[in-house]
Amino acid sequence: MSRAVDSAIVHSGEGALMAKSGRSGVQDPAALKPWPKRPARLAHAVVESLTDSIVSGAVPPGATLPVEPELCETFGVSRITVREAVKSLEAKGLVRARQGSGTTVTQPEEWNLLDPVVLAATVQHDGELVVLDQLVGVRSALEAQMAAQAAELATDDDLREVERLLDLLDEEIAAPARFVETDVFFHDRIMQASRNRLGRSIIRTVHTQARSTFLYNGTPDGHSCEQANAEHRRIVERLLARDAQGAAQAMTAHIEAAWSRRRIPHPDIAS
């Protein structure tokens, strides 16, 4: 959100509050409906900007954030909005606010990488692919476990739906953009069949943020889609055979091979 737009929204809200108090000259203050609380998106915009500055290293660990009036001036927002933003940063583990000491940026080990805003910024600035490599490792371990569970717990309807998606992927090999989207549904359908709600929730959180960057997606083509679907087929074969160990191994092999095909060997800068 631009500073000008942000300021306009803030002033609009303040004007409405003035009208309610009768100082604006409005004859019937009750006709106006000011916000019951500050709009969340104002603080969210400040949080996203500060998170990016922290994660990128522009504001390094141990540094102190500017004082409240300076943040208000920088973002063109009120003190209430700044305070909401700082509280949100604290909840994400990015800063620690102490009376008399200011608000200090914490060490990266304290950041909550499962928070969507923190994870999105971390992935965006992961020029060495360290976090993405770790993310793929977590995804591989969890999805392998869920593939094994699906082999044991999937209903016949679950398996028919997984097969249907596999056939659809075959049809979309020559259309990589559509293939990539259906691929997400394919993996998610197996996770649903595992009945592992927590594992699925974790994967959906980290994978959604990873897919927002070119560093993770690469540039899929027909050949890579064909390879991926051959690997998908091996997973489905093990699911249909109710082979838990085989399904887990096939899933691990697929996720790791697919990442090795997409991974940029030595990116010069973060995307």
Image: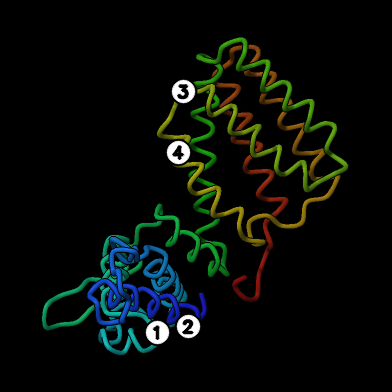
Numbered disc in front, either 2 or 4: 2
Cα separation between marks 4 and 3: 11 Å
The part of the image, by quadrant, that contains residue 190 is top right
Residue at label 1?
76
Q: 10 Å neighbourhood of mark 4: few (<14), some, or many (≥20)? A: few
Q: Along the polypeptide, which appears first: circle 1 or circle 3?
A: 1
Q: Could you tell me which secondary element the residue under label 1 belongs to? A: loop
C-alpha span from label 2 to label 4: 35 Å
Percent position of residue 215, x then y: 64, 61
**What's the CA distance linking mark 2 and mark 3?**
46 Å
> Which residue matches tag 4?
201
Residue at 52% over, 79% down = 2
Q: Decide which of tag 4 and tag 3 comes sooner along the chain.
A: 3
Specify the label residue 195 is tagged with: 3
Which residue is tagged 2? Answer: 3
Name which residue type carries label 3: Arg
Q: Is residue 20 visible?
A: yes
N-term mark: 2 or 3: 2
Q: Nearer the viewer, residue 214 or 27?
A: 27
Element assignment for label 2:
helix
Asked if the residue at tag 3 contacts the one at tag 2, i.e. Cβ–Cβ closer than 8 Å, the answer is: no
Instruction: Determine whether, in the image, residue 85 is placed left or right of residue 269.
Output: left
Residue, far right: 174
Tell me which label, 1 or 2, sits earlier in the chain: 2
Asked if residue 110 shows in the view, the reply is no
Separation of marks 1 and 2 at Cα, in angstroms: 6 Å
Q: Please, what is the three-letter code of the amino acid marked with disc 1? A: Gly
Q: Are marks 1 and 2 in contact (CB under 8 Å)?
A: yes
Give the residue displayed 62% in from the left and 76% down from the top: 269
Q: Depth-wise, is mark 1 or mark 3 nearer the camera? A: 1
Q: Residue at x 27, y 88 (%)?
A: 69
